[in-house]
Image (tube, grey):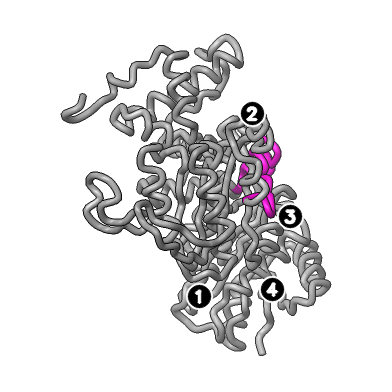
Amino acid sequence: MTDAVFLIDDDDAIRESVAQTFALASLSCRTFSCARSALEAIQQTGLPDVVVTDVKLKGIDGLQLLRSARAIDPGLPVIVITGHGDVPMAVEAMRSGAFDFLMKPFSSASIVARVRSAIASRPRGGAAGATPATANDSGMVGSSSAMQRVRAAVKALGASPADVLLLGETGTGKEVVARALHAASGRRGPFVAINCCALPEAVFESEMFGHEAGAFTGALRRRVGKLEHANGGTVFLDEVESMPLALQGKLLRAIQEREVERLGGNTSVRIDCRFVTATKVDLLDAGTRGTFRTDLYYRIGVATLRLPPLRERIEDIPELYAYFAAEASSRFGLPLSPCPDPLLRDWATREWPGNVREFRNAVERHCFGVEDLIGDGDVGLPSSLNDLVADAERRYIESALRQSGGHVNQAAVRLGVPRKTLYDKLVRFAIDARQYRTGTDA
């Protein structure tokens, strides 16, 4: 029987401390001071359940160990440990198939949690050729206490049938967490995401509940709605606060009874799906203002999970950088771009009103070699913070309009804001969406 964990680190103190942590967590562990001895042990005694290795090692480094171990078994989860100055190496490790990485210093709870997750992902019997789902496949990146609470909540709620309400600012990763809840639920049906803000009211009911042939002009055949399509899976309702008030009652009935009635039909159709909803506003307050049904709020909020804004988890920035830099490198074919410490320190001082979504854009700009809005020195910066934020906001809006061909509805979806909010901002910044129109309707 092999040990659960192979731990490789050439720092005696760290190696002994982490090994003791594993022992207290009832994880059998074998330690090595170099990669060569670990590889020899793998060849002689077989594969462990997971490998934990420092990136910087004498002789064969952690990246070479990662590639060699995964050449023996592509399904072997490898967790790499790295310092702040080694972020580019961590990025390269993720591209090479690392299961996860940890930034120094890390807590005992954090490394034990990552190892347990890696062991759980290990194919039964350690079959070569199997590819485990990495911890970062969920997109919930970060070792901060705030993110550990989110992970714990997802784990606790995952297998539960309870409907979940996600509360968080724009860009905090509500859909990422919704997908993680779906993955943890074990449901075999699809994950169906619906942006309530993006669906025009005229077609909302048909899209959600489906319609029968002849239900309205142009309805030539029966159409299954999104709720019915999600049977056996999870329905994710994003920006639920923007759902037309007239349809909230019908949604309430669908959630309570777990059945839908297609537009123009007389027969109820049973559905077996879990509802995960997301909002960035106080729905109880919306209820007092008459824009959201309080009975619907109490029904969808059986369990409420608050997602932290980036300013409350600044310590996650190095890990987020490594994750998004690796993603940008793979997606755009860019060379891995190191992040200088001054830029990391600068990023740590920002408010990030757009949260992780905004930070991802900043990382991609850096990877493309485009100077960030706050760069070296303050030459050319707007005269005040308000001017700086307004300038950034204007640029994002113009970029979204450009990408959507001047269509405001599509731009609002890209920006993650309600359509009315975007129209208000177009007036505020004197932006004419028509100048971005393309094609025949330009």
Q: Between disc 2 and disc 3, whose residue precedes?
A: 3
Real-space Cα distance between discs 2 and 1? Answer: 54 Å
Q: Between disc 3 and disc 4, whose residue precedes?
A: 4
Q: Is residue 284 visible?
A: yes
Look at label 3 and name its amino acid.
Phe
Real-space Cα distance between discs 4 and 2? Answer: 63 Å
- Which quadrant does the C terminus fall into? top left
281 with respect to 270 (left or right)? right
Say which element carries label 1.
loop
Q: Nearer the viewer, mark 2 or mark 3?
A: 2
Please give the residue where the numbered disc 1 appears in the rendered image: 75
Contact (Cβ within 8 Å) of mark 1 with mark 3: no
Numbered circle sitting on residue 289: 2
Real-space Cα distance between discs 1 and 3? Answer: 25 Å
Q: Nearer the viewer, mark 2 or mark 1?
A: 2
Q: Residue furthest top?
A: 383
Numbered circle sitting on residue 259: none
Look at label 1 and name its amino acid.
Gly
Q: Between disc 1 and disc 3, whose residue precedes?
A: 1
Please give the residue where the numbered disc 4 appears in the rendered image: 32
Please give the residue where the numbered disc 3 appears in the rendered image: 106
Inspect the magenta stretch and tell me whether residue 312 lies in it: yes
